[in-house]
Image (cartoon, rainbow, N blue to C red):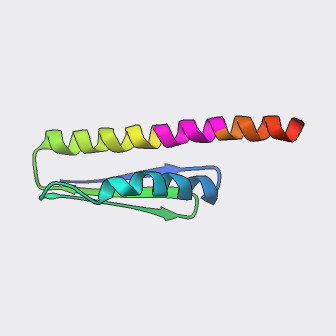
């Protein structure tokens, strides 16, 4: 089974930050599971190949999206802080 997840961002900076944030998760994976995350322009592409159970693929996608969500929340906080600093 294979899955490709493609997420678009406003700019390359955000896409690069997300790709870097989720890439450490790609290092140690069970045998039969392959995950590769890259950035192409302002998009983050993650390719997942799973030779295990469907539940493993679903759990992997869920974990990835949770990590992406955390990175996006961090962006939101940083953007608010930058805006406050600029107003000061």
Closer to the camera in the image, 15 or 81: 81
Q: Residue at x 50, y 51 (%)?
A: 18
Q: Main secondary structure of the magenta part?
A: helix
Q: Residue at x 31, y 38 (%)?
A: 62
Residue 35's place in the image compared with 78, above or below, is: below
Q: Residue at x 31, y 57 (%)?
A: 26
Q: Is residue 69 left or right of residue 51?
A: right
- Quadrant of residue 45 in the image? bottom left
Q: Residue at x 64, y 50 (%)?
A: 10
Q: Quadrant of the C terminus?
A: top right
Residue 47 rendering spot, x and y as whole percentages: 32, 58
Residue furthest to the right: 88
Residue 74 rendering spot, x and y as whole percentages: 57, 39
Residue 47's place in the image compared with 53, above or below, is: below
Q: Is residue 71 left or right of residue 22?
A: right
Residue 22 rendering spot, x and y as whole percentages: 41, 52
Range of magenta residues: 70-77
**Residue 30 forms part of the magenta stretch:** no
**Residue 76 forms part of the magenta stretch:** yes
- Quadrant of residue 36 in the image? bottom left
Numbered disc total: 0
């Amino acid at each position: 089974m294979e899955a490709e997840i493609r997420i678009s961002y406003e700019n390359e900076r955000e896409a690069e930050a997300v790709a870097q944030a989720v890439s450490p998760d790609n290092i140690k994976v069970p045998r039969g599971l392959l995950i590769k995350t890259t950035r192409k322009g302002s998009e983050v592409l993650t390719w997942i190949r799973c030779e295990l159970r469907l539940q493993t693929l679903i759990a992997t996608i869920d974990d990835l999206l949770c990590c992406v969500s955390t990175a996006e929340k961090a962006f939101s906080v940083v953007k608010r802080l930058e805006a406050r600093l600029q107003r000061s």
